[in-house]
Amino acid sequence: MSQPEGAASAPAQQDGLAAQIKDLDSRFWIVNAMEMFERLAYYGVRAVAAIYIVLPASQGGPELSHIDKGTIFAWWAAVQSLLPMFTGGYADRYGHKKTIAVAIVLKVIGYVMMAYLKDFWGLFFGCMFLAAGTAIFKPGVQGTLAATMKPKNASVGWGIFYQLVNIGGFLGPVVAGLLRQMDWSYVFLSCAVIVSINFFWLPFYKDPSDDFEPDEAFSTPLKVLITSVVGLFKPRVFFFCIVFSGFWLMFNQVFDLLPNVIDDWVDTSDVIGVLGTSFAGPVVPTLLALGAGLIYAILCGSLVLLSMRPDRQKTSEVATSSYAIVGIASALAIGLPISGFGGLEFLPESTLGVVGAALIVCGVGLVSAVIARLSGLSGKFLTASLAVVGGVSAFVLTRGTLLESSGELVRMAGAGEQIPPEWMINLNPGLIILTMIFFGYLSGKVRPLVSIIVGMVIATVGSVIAGTAVFGFICLGGILVFSVGEMLSSPKKMEYLSTLAPPGQQGLFMGYANIPSAIGWITGSIYAGNKYEEHGDKVNLARKHLVNELGMSQEAADEIDRADVVAALGERLDMTALEVQQLLFETYHPEEIWYDIGLIGLASIIGMVIYDRVVRHLDRDKSKGTAAA
């Protein structure tokens, strides 16, 4: 009896977790490494873009409005999320590796433009280059994943993909948060360098699109375009994308709007104070340092493992080009911890210091690569040694830094200082790194649509908690809940759509996975940008209070530098900045925007339940009809 369409979405007979991981194709691991570097760069910018775009000029930002930010994000969403509907087909037709190479070039151009162009149009087109590069990059990588995984390990495979994505997503905001304290341009330029690393990976895997004869539907560029559009309007694909888009409206605002909400309304000094107190003893710093060391060890060791493949080939057979990756791993294991944790105190905290640290890191990598190549050190030895060196370095330096920071953190909390919003949201990828394989394994025991629905419910609750919080720990709790829901829902959309993809069209259908995000991101950006500009932005509400409640003229209020408006209101009311923040929150209720966003998420959940019931009904009828025939 033949299977009805979509029947493959039922959970397959599974081996144990270790067996499923071992059975994954080598190409799976290589494109995951590429995605990790791409996400490190992307989220380094994505985590701070919402803050940067509206940042006052006196603080180094473009000082655009939230409406301008919403417009840029809406177009960003359209290009990045709708373009894969077409680039996925072209990736299948012309090769995943070729499209990835083009994508890297476009992303580098975008990052460089964002580093130096601060007017609306300069920033706009920089974001568009970045969006186009991402749109071309994703189907090539995700198409390779879909083509190389098997039904029995697809859930774990997509879970690992999502976990490695979030290693990049976790490290990106950390790097951005450090670099923006020196100069905002360093954030964008460093991301251009990071994404360029992916050029080194291209020689290391066979393009899976070579395994298929070109689909007749992809015989010409015009047919690729037509097939892409027609495939989207297949009922299962189309209605899934429409229903899921409401969830993605809410999802994207966690990363586009929540940073502004945290910056404006959440008092995170309580988190700083608790961390300062807990770092006074050795237990918490040791546990956190162990986690940091483990993540860093995996990162350093896996690079060598993937490039040299000591499990598949002898060291004498390793291509010379592989040692470029060994050099990168050496730079991470030896050079980066030294410079990143203050081991280069002799360098000034300026452009000269950044350049000097970069040169030392690159020098370490180059020398290590040459030594490894000339000495013929085995891949297993290099993998283990760099993992150990990187892990131990990260552990020692992280632990020492945390212990030394205790007194300063307590002082900062007493002074009312705040945690950068991107570091608060970084709990999301941090949790995913630690638990995604477990949740991927867990969600593999149920149908993808069931996991998606459960995840949508949990994520919606978490987003509302985080978006309406005024205290740091409540906000972090909401982000934690949201992250659990994300792990149960987001990776499963790719698994579900991959079950609907005909052979040779995996890249195309992975492109469709971006459509729900596109619809939700576009509408959410426009809606949130306009509403937050008038009803949520703290500076705008402070100006409103000066005019409506204290009798200041609108012209005088507008003339106050954006960075000084809250302080000006505090002087007139004889209040501290935190007291002004509380007054404005209780008077104007900016949290109400998140109730609206939560209701949209709820409507999407109801729609997905209906979609699931309809699909199951259709599959039962088709199975009965096939059996009768």
Image (spheres, rainbow, N blue to C red):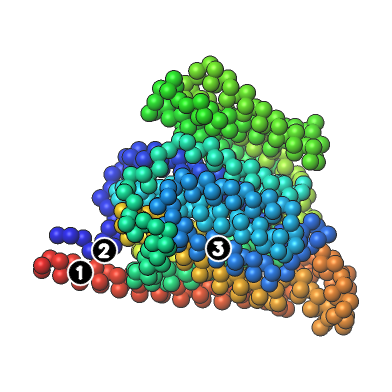
Quarter occupied by the C terminus: bottom left
Mark 1: few, some, or many residues within 10 Å (few <14, many ≥20)?
some
Q: Secondary structure at mark 1?
A: helix
Kind of residue at badge 1 = Lys
Can residue 435 be seen?
Answer: no
Ranked by sequence position, the earlier of labels 2 and 3 is: 2
Looking at the picture, how far across and down is residue 320, in whole percent?
Answer: 51, 25
Can residue 342 be seen?
Answer: yes
How far, Cα to Cα, is label 1 from label 2?
9 Å
Ranked by sequence position, the earlier of labels 3 and 1 is: 3
In-image side of 347 versus 320 (left or right): right
Taking the spot 59% from the left edge, 45% from the top edge, the residue there is: 195
User: Viewer-proximal residue, 362 or 276?
Assistant: 362
Give the number of the disc on residue 79. 3
Q: Is residue 517 above or below residue 154?
A: below
Looking at the picture, how far across and down is residue 551, in whole percent?
Answer: 87, 83
Taking the spot 89% from the left edge, 76% from the top edge, the residue there is: 556
How far, Cα to Cα, is label 3 from label 1?
37 Å
Looking at the picture, how far across and down is residue 529, in whole percent?
Answer: 65, 72
On the image, numbered disc 2 is attached to which residue?
Answer: 5
Q: Is residue 329 above or below residue 94?
A: above
Ranked by sequence position, the earlier of labels 1 and 2 is: 2
